[in-house]
Amino acid sequence: ELKKYPSLAAFHAWLAERTACGFVTRSEAVSMLPPVILGCRPGDVVLDMCAAPGSKTTQLLEDVGETGLVVANETDEKRACMLASHTRRIGMPHAFVTACDGRRFPGLNKDDKEGNCFDRVLADVPCSGDGTMRKNGGVMRRWKCNDSVTLHPLQIALAWRGLCLTKIGGYMCYSTCSLNPTENEAVVAEIMRRAPPGSLELLDRRSDIKGLVSRPGMTHWKVMTEIPETKREVRDRKMSYKMKKKREFYENLGVDRDKKKKEEVKEEGKEEVKEEAKEEVKEKVNNDQEK
């Protein structure tokens, strides 16, 4: 955005230089909320389950200080390499980058059989990103109802593993870039249902952040899904598109469409007969093999 304003060219150059040197890390204000809510203290051992590109990891590193440790995990190896480059650029040696499936992230203390080894865990899980439509028009074009339903099991698995890795008395923060309840309230509700009675407490941290505008979580919601097309509907749609293109082509050439249409019908009939004959032969062969 700064490039659009010539009057801010000097500031843009200064900002780019400081970012390259590791003195500045740019992040949107709303993206900075999860680490603030997590409330890390100096000396804490923290797990960032889905860390790339690393802006939240930078916040966590600042909070725990040099006496603490942040394990920044990223499933994708290329993104993990970018994350390692980022932590090296900002010059914070108390970061440990891993490339592991968060659903099967191992415990770091072999003596602790239950794997409860982290004081804080941040689960900023993969999501549909429908909450970013205000700034990213591509999300609107790619958005589908089934996205949240497809991601729901993965989000539950990551959140559950994060809880299993949290020490007794520790904290885990679950966050997404989505607004729909399937990826938020529904995940939290399922985690609360799975947890043994008395082992998990849901905290309201809104009062800890002054000026934060928020709304209560939803308690009832509908799960939106796509209406699946039948094979016949898909075939009819494809045939309609093909016939439309052929009609436009013949109109441009000035060809007698009725004559061509009759010929096409004949050819299609022949092809259907051939296909039916092939299917009958296959069925006979299969029946003979079964016998």
Image: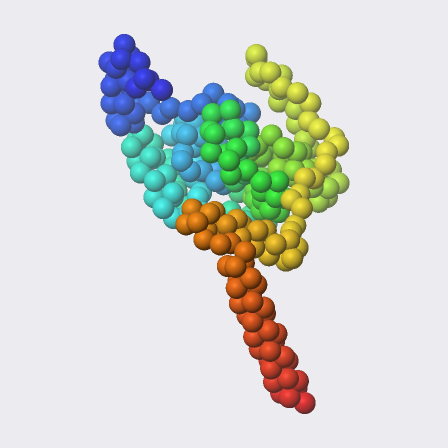
Q: Residue at x 58, y 68 (%)?
A: 269
What is the image's colouring? rainbow
Foreground residue, 155 or 170? 155
Q: Residue at x 59, y 73 (%)?
A: 273
Foreground residue, 50 or 162? 50
Residue 199 lies, in percent from the top left, at: 70, 39
Give the quadrant of residue 84. Answer: top left
In this rendering, the answer to whether 6 lies above or below 257 is: above
Foreground residue, 17 or 288? 288
> Quadrant of the image for the C terminus?
bottom right
> Quadrant of the image for the N terminus?
top left
Please indicate, yes or no, whether residue 222 appears anywhere in the rendered image. Answer: yes
Judge from the rendering whether residue 100 lies leftward or rightward of residue 148; answer left or right: left
Q: Residue at x 50, y 50 (%)?
A: 247
In this rendering, the answer to whether 64 lies above or below 142 is: above
Judge from the rendering whether residue 74 lies leftward or rightward of residue 84; answer left or right: right
In this rendering, the answer to whether 31 lies above or below 238 is: above
Residue 92 lies, in percent from the top left, at: 34, 32
Give the quadrant of residue 265. Answer: bottom right
Residue 55 lies, in percent from the top left, at: 41, 30
Foreground residue, 199 or 155? 155
Residue 31 lies, in percent from the top left, at: 48, 26
